[in-house]
Amino acid sequence: FLKINLVTDGDYISNVFKDEQFDYVFHFAAYAAEGLSPFIRTYNYDNNLRATAGIVNECIKNDVTRLVFTSTLAVYGHQDGNIFDENQVPKPIDPYGVAKYSVEVDLKLASEQFGMEYNIVRPHNVLGKYQNIWDRYRNVIGIFIRKALTGNPLLVYGDGEQIRDWLYVEDHAEALFEVVTRGVIGETYNIGGNNEYKNIDVIKTICQIMEDLHPI
């Protein structure tokens, strides 16, 4: 595992592209702290916009067949009823959403100017067994798990009857494969699961698992 900075390690990244001659590039890297982004604007744009611009440049220079960019539902902002579809005009309400949407616009320009093939995917509530549960600002299931592990109360906004659709990471990977094998070049795809769960039921499940693991 090698940790690199997509902004400052540009020469290293250029050499990797040159040496490996990728056919497809899946760009997942981001600092995805949406709620924190208004307070770290420069850091947010450096990591989520400038860094991605460098990847786009390398794809163009090295004739990559297609770039698949992982965007976010945050580009939509607050649409009517918080129901999102690909035909809606994005209206981000925070710097994280702005950065991601800016990349989407830049990809369309790169396609028009250089003929670069691309797809945009906007995943919805991805979770998996290796997710980071120590981040205070993202992934509500991770936050619930951390609070349960540390004996802290689980904060619920409203009555907990809010419904979310969760996407397991392996299903997300399968969907990405479908994008490059069957997807239309230049299209944007929202990727979500097929089951809806109430927040309160998720909390009850987490608490029950913790009780089973550590009975009083």
Image (cartoon, grey):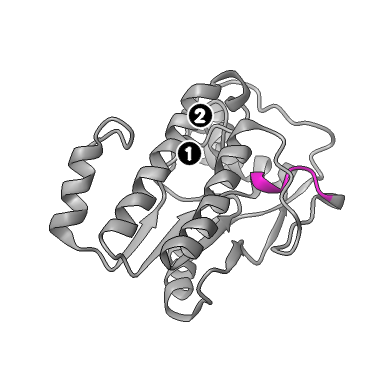
Tell me which label, 1 or 2, sits earlier in the chain: 2
Q: Report the magenta residues as a range.
A: 74-79
Residue 177 to residue 71: above or below: below
> In the figure, 144 relative to 195: above or below?
above
- In the picture, the quarter occupied by the C terminus is top right
Quadrant for the N terminus, please: top left
* Magenta-span inclusion, residue 77: yes
Q: Amino acid at mark 2?
A: Asn
Instruction: Tell me the tag on residue 49.
Output: 1
Q: Identify the residue at the far bottom of this view.
A: 182
Picture residue at 73% right of the left edge, 62% below the top: 85
Point 47% across, 75% down: residue: 178
Which mark is drawn over residue 44?
2
Identified at 79% across, 45% down, the residue is: 162
Q: Position of residue 25 (x, y in %)?
A: 34, 60
Can you tell which quarter of the image residue 20 is in?
A: bottom left
- Label 1 sits on a secondary structure element that is helix
- As displayed, is residue 37 above or below residue 79? above
103 and 183: which one is in front?
103
Say the numbered circle drawn on residue 156. Answer: none
Please state which of residues 63 and 170 is positioned toward the viewer in this rendering.
63
Q: How many marks on residues?
A: 2
Q: Position of residue 152 (x, y in %)?
A: 59, 20
Q: Secondary structure at mark 2?
A: helix
Disc 1 and disc 2 in contact, CB within 8 angstroms:
yes
Most foreground residue, 215 or 98? 98
